[in-house]
Image: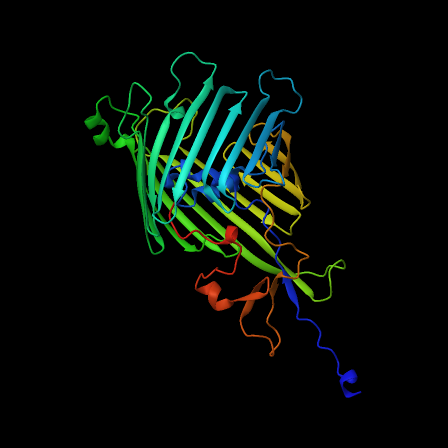
């Protein structure tokens, strides 16, 4: 009788943690084919911030990312883009890519075939990565081409790379071309605590090997400072400076902010008191430092800034400002299977004042959300009761993740795709 009169303890208040719109980014699926120098220093994050969900003025795009239910190792990515009014001839471009991936959770070992209407070449790309040794090999080669002459060297590449917790180095060669340069491309990146430095060699000037090695226009160097982890559930801060080919100075800034705000949603349960938001800020400044003559009316410096705010799992607002135009984009995503995303962009020309719109559509069942808003197993707890375990912040499945783990960057309880990489790839 006494037990029946005991008042049941109400459930603890929770803060919802929505999935990010695009994580991991599609460009990360082929990062083994790219120089680490071109991806680190916040470059990959800035690329996504400045390009994703921004459509060109008076253009549309559609992208389909599909995989069969019975075999998750293969997938197909197809895209089309063109003018909204269809007046311009030859501006309608289609691309298709068929991919096989050895490990569903590891995108670094794969083979894909790609073709495009803008470049009539059936191209094969492959990569093999051995995480135990940190060694990877990759190749790009055309299988079928409509062109009868020699293809560009970018379609006949072989490379070798090595990555560890604080070092990444690699080089590419073009063994199937008459002008086989050794190397065609090379890079070295080192991480020391929060600092990252790197150098890259790309021979575009000079006729002899020795002259190419000593020509500073073939070399680029960069340095960066970063705070936080690469996990999207943790805040991060990155600044970088680069001297590209001894002719251009580039300064970048990127910050990923994870914040909580109070919310009262009549469609949620009473214990839901807030929601997690993701805010991204970035800018890039490019300035010429040599005496090379630029085209008429071309500025010596370019500056662009961008910001994004994901308010919940369904809405994303982005904006960017450049020297010639400004763009505002609103995206809506429905987390069905497959997921659907629609975005509209409005671009204002600073010179004429004209405003033109672009539209985008995405259908995706390759990347699934690791945690859903309504799933009680994946919520952030707010420790405001004394009897609760002190410092509990995340609850992933049945195991809690403590604040001390977040501070120590111990993300072992997170899903694999949300954990930061332990190596510089």
Q: Position of residue 123 (x, y in %)?
A: 46, 25
Q: Is residue 153 above or below residue 129?
A: above
- Residue 317 is left or right of residue 51, and the answer is right
Judged from this view, the residue extending furthest toward the left is 210
Q: Position of residue 386 (x, y in %)?
A: 60, 79
Give residue 89's quadrant in the image.
Answer: top right
Judge whether residue 221 can be spotted in this image. no
Residue in front for this viewpoint, 204 or 11: 11
For image coordinates 62% across by 54% down, the residue present is: 18
- Residue 191 is left or right of residue 272, and the answer is left
Residue in front for this viewpoint, 83 or 347: 83
Judged from this view, the residue extending furthest toward the bottom is 2
- Residue 422 is left or right of residue 60, and the answer is left
For image coordinates 73% across by 66% down, the residue present is: 270
Q: Is residue 392 above or below residue 229?
A: below
Judge whether residue 383 can be spotted in this image. yes
Give residue 377's quadrant in the image.
Answer: bottom right
For image coordinates 28% across by 23% down, the residue present is: 180
For image coordinates 52% across by 58% down, the residue present is: 414
Check the picture and name the quadrant holding the C terminus: top left
Residue in front for this viewpoint, 41 or 5: 5
Q: Is residue 145 above or below residue 417?
A: above
Judged from this view, the residue extending furthest toward the front is 70
Q: Position of residue 1 (x, y in %)?
A: 80, 87
Q: Position of residue 78 (x, y in %)?
A: 59, 30
């Amino acid at each position: 009788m006494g037990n029946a009169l005991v008042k049941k303890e109400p459930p603890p208040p929770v803060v919802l943690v929505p999935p990010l719109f695009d994580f991991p980014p599609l460009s990360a699926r082929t990062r083994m084919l790219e120089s680490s120098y071109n991806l680190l220093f916040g470059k990959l994050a800035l690329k996504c911030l400045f390009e994703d969900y921004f459509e060109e003025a008076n253009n549309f795009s559609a992208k389909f990312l599909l995989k069969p239910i019975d075999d998750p190792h293969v997938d197909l990515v197809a895209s089309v883009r063109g003018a909204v009014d269809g007046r311009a001839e030859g501006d309608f471009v289609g691309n298709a890519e068929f991919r096989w991936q050895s490990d569903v959770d590891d995108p670094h070992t794969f083979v894909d075939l790609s073709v495009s209407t803008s470049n009539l070449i059936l191209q094969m790309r492959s990569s093999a990565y051995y995480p135990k040794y940190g060694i990877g090999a990759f190749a790009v080669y055309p299988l079928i081409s409509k062109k009868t002459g020699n293809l560009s060297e970018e379609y006949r590449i072989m490379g070798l790379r090595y990555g560890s917790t604080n070092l990444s180095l690699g080089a590419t060669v073009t063994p199937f071309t008459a002008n086989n340069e050794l190397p065609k491309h090379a890079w070295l990146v080192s991480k020391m605590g929060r600092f990252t430095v790197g150098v890259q060699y790309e021979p575009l000037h000079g006729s002899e090997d020795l002259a190419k090695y000593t020509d500073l226009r073939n070399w680029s160097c960069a340095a960066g400072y970063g705070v936080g982890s690469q996990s999207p559930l943790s805040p991060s801060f990155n600044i970088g400076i680069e001297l590209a080919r001894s002719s251009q100075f580039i300064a970048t800034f990127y910050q990923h902010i994870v914040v909580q705000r109070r919310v009262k949603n009549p469609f949620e349960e009473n214990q839901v008191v807030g929601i997690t938001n993701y805010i991204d800020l970035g800018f890039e400044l490019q300035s010429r430092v040599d005496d090379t003559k630029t085209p008429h009316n071309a500025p010596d410096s370019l500056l662009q800034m961008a910001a994004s705010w994901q308010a919940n799992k369904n809405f994303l607002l982005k904006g960017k400002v450049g020297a010639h135009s400004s763009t505002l984009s609103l995206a809506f995503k429905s987390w069905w299977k497959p997921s659907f995303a629609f975005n509209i962009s409005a671009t204002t020309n600073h010179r004429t004042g004209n405003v033109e719109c672009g539209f985008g559509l995405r259908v995706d069942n390759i990347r699934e959300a690791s945690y859903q808003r309504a799933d009680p197993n994946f919520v952030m707890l707010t420790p405001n009761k004394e009897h609760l375990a002190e410092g509990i912040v995340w609850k992933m499945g049945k195991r809690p993740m403590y604040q001390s783990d977040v501070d120590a960057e111990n993300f072992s309880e997170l899903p694999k795709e949300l954990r930061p990489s332990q190596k510089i790839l």
